[in-house]
Image: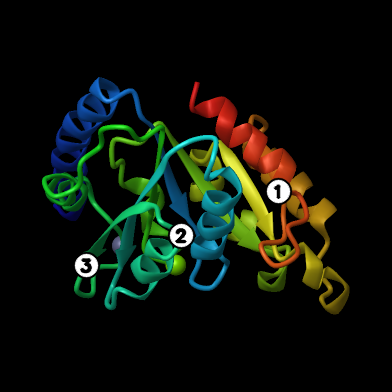
Amino acid sequence: MKIKVVSNILKANDSIAEKNRQLFKENKLFVINLISSPGAGKTSLLERTIKTLNSKISIGVIEGDIATTRDAERIEKTGARVIQINTNGACHLDSNMVRTALQNFPLNGLDILFIENVGNLVCPANFNLGEDIKAVVLSVTEGDDKPKKYPGIFREAKILIINKTDLLPYTDCSIDKIKKESLEINPDLNIFEVSCRSGEGFDEWCNYIVSLSN
Ligand code: MG
Ligand code: ZN
C-alpha cells in the first residue's frame, strides 16, 4: 500500500518536471540540480563559479532551503539573477516548487541555471525537477566513505565535485578512495576536485561549465 503511494507521488512529480524541462528547452537553458549534504559548499561553489564566469556566460540560480534567504542573499551579491524557495521543513525540492518559483523568475538571457537543492544526500536523488543533469558536491571533511553509504545520488549524478581540497592535509580522507568507490557505482561520473577558498581546480571546472552552455 505504502509503495503505491510513493510511486504515485513520484509519477506526479515527473509529469510536472516534464513541463519544467520543456520551458528550459524553449529558453535554451542548461539546468544543473546541485545536491550535497549541509555544509559541503554548494553556495560557495556557485559564488566562485559565477564570479569567475561573469564576463563569459549568464548564470541564474534557484535557491532551495528549509528556512531563511541567506544563500539567496549571498548569490545576489554576485549580481546573478536569483530566487529563493523555502520548503518550510521539507527535506528536498520537488518539481512543483520549482514550477511555482519559475512564475516569478524570468529565464530570458540566461545560459546556465543552477538549482541548489536542500542540503541532503538522500531524497533529492529521487526527485526529478526537469534538470538536464544532477551534480553532487562532496567535501573532503565529510569523509571518504560517503559514496558507498549514499549510492543513490552517486548513481543519479553526472558530475561529482570534490570540494575543500585545501583542507585535505587536516583530514584522513582519501580522494583516491572517493574516486574509486564513486566510479564503481557510476563509471560515467565526471569528477572535479576544487577548493572554493583557494580557487584550486576552478579553471577546469569553469571551462566545463562554459562548454555546457553552448
Ligand atoms: Mg547553500
Ligand atoms: Zn526529502
Residue 189 visible in the picture: no
* Residue of label 2: 78
Up-down relation of residue 23 to residue 178 (above or below): above
Q: Which comes sooner in the sequence, label 2 or label 3?
A: 2
Q: Nearer the viewer, residue 163 or 36?
A: 163
Q: Quadrant of residue 20?
A: top left
Marks 2 and 3: which is nearer the front? 2
Q: Secondary structure at mark 2?
A: loop
Q: Is 122 left, or right, of 142 in this rendering?
A: left
Q: Is mark 1 within 8 Å of ligand 1?
A: no
Residue 87's label in the rendered image is 3
Amino acid type, mark 2: Thr
Q: Residue furthest front?
A: 55
Q: Residue at x 31, y 41 (%)?
A: 128
Residue 202's label in the rendered image is 1
Amino acid type, mark 3: Thr
Q: Which comes sooner in the sequence, label 2 or label 1?
A: 2
Q: Position of residue 169 (x, y in %)?
A: 88, 73
Q: Is 210 left, or right, of 90 in this rendering?
A: right
Q: Is 1 left, or right, of 86 in this rendering?
A: left
Label 1 neighbour load within 10 Å: few <14, some 14-19, many 20+:
some
- Disc 2 and disc 3: Cα gap in Å? 24 Å
- Disc 3 and disc 1: Cα gap in Å? 31 Å
- Ligand 2 shown in quarter: bottom left
Q: Position of residue 141 (x, y in %)?
A: 70, 73
Q: Which comes sooner in the sequence, label 3 or label 1?
A: 3
